Image (cartoon, rainbow, N blue to C red):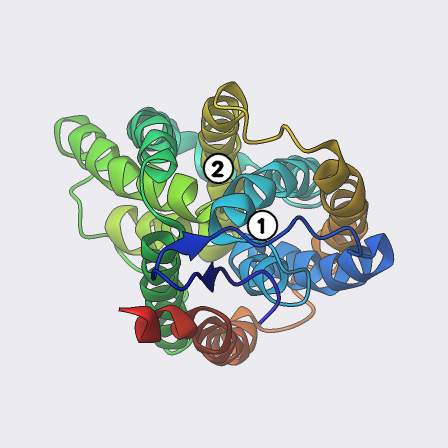
Amino acid sequence: MAGQPEKSSRGTTLEPPLRRDRKPWLAFTWAVPISLVGGLMGLGGAEFRLPVLAGPLGYLAKQVVPLNLAISLVTVTVALLIRGQTLSMAGLVPFRPVLASLIAGAMITAYLGATWVRHISNERLERTILVLLVSIGIALLIEAFLPQSFPGLIPAVLAWQVPAGVLFGLAIGLVSSVLGVAGGELIIPTLIFAFGVDIRSAGTGSLIVSLPTVLIGLIRYARSRAFSDPQALRQTVLPMGIGSVIGAIMGGLLVGIISPAVLKFGLGLILIVSAVRVFAHTQGHN
């Protein structure tokens, strides 16, 4: 598979030569529909970009994660601006302490997770990505059959909500920095089922939490020189960023047109299949 490390005669892993044939139009073409469906659900769509970056575009896992995070920042920012214009923020006002606590916890582990990724092997990171993507796919399948409103499992008392928000945020930030995703696939069900936020407000709330989480992870990766290859920025981040803006705008404007439950079920299946096809090859190396 393109971008897969090769083995030397002594069994050591060799980095593949840097590819110079990645086509910007291909990155753009994939980005538009991914961000469109992400915008419809209040997600950045980054979990669906991972198999594309590692498959058709041929990047190694340790290259995929920071590139995906950079594109996620563009997508989340635009999606939040669009949803802010098309949907009311009133439903989130009572949950401001919850959002703040989620952000606080997520920013801590987003920084630590980006540090951890630097010190593990490409093969181990690919196995981690596979497990997390399949788990997210299964979660999407389950969420498709759950009610769109829920009373909330955490009591509506600050003494309960704030510590719970920090704990949930710690898990969200870790997944965000390890996968290079915005984390909406975890934030939305957390807001709905733990705190009782309605589904549309949860989609907007997920973007509010995602923005600083992605930003802190991105800063950590940038400081470790993860973006030292300008060609990757030109050939992939730029065209995918532009395509993501277009898709996010379309998705934000079409919110409510397609049932989120139908989207989640179909995309959950697609995510599981694509993750296994792209990342399961590492299981045979050990």
**Could you tell me which residue is drawn at 47 percent across and 45 percent down?**
62
Quadrant (top left, top right, bottom left, bottom right) of the C terminus:
bottom left
Residue 273 drawn at (x, y percent): 48, 80
Label placed on residue 210: 2
| Dot 1 or dot 2, earlier in sequence | 1
In the figure, is residue 84 to the left or right of 286? Answer: right
Q: Please name the amino acid that badge 2 sits on.
A: Ser
Q: What number of labels is visible?
A: 2
Q: Please name the amino acid that badge 1 sits on.
A: Gly
In the figure, is residue 157 to the left or right of 268? Answer: left
**Circle 1 crowding by C-alpha within 10 Å: few under 14, some 14–19, many from 20:** many
Label placed on residue 44: 1
Residue 89 drawn at (x, y percent): 56, 36
Report, in whole angstroms, how far the alpha carbon at label 1 lies from the one at label 2.
9 Å
* Residue that lies at the very extreme toward the front in this rendered image: 9
Residue 134 drawn at (x, y percent): 37, 70
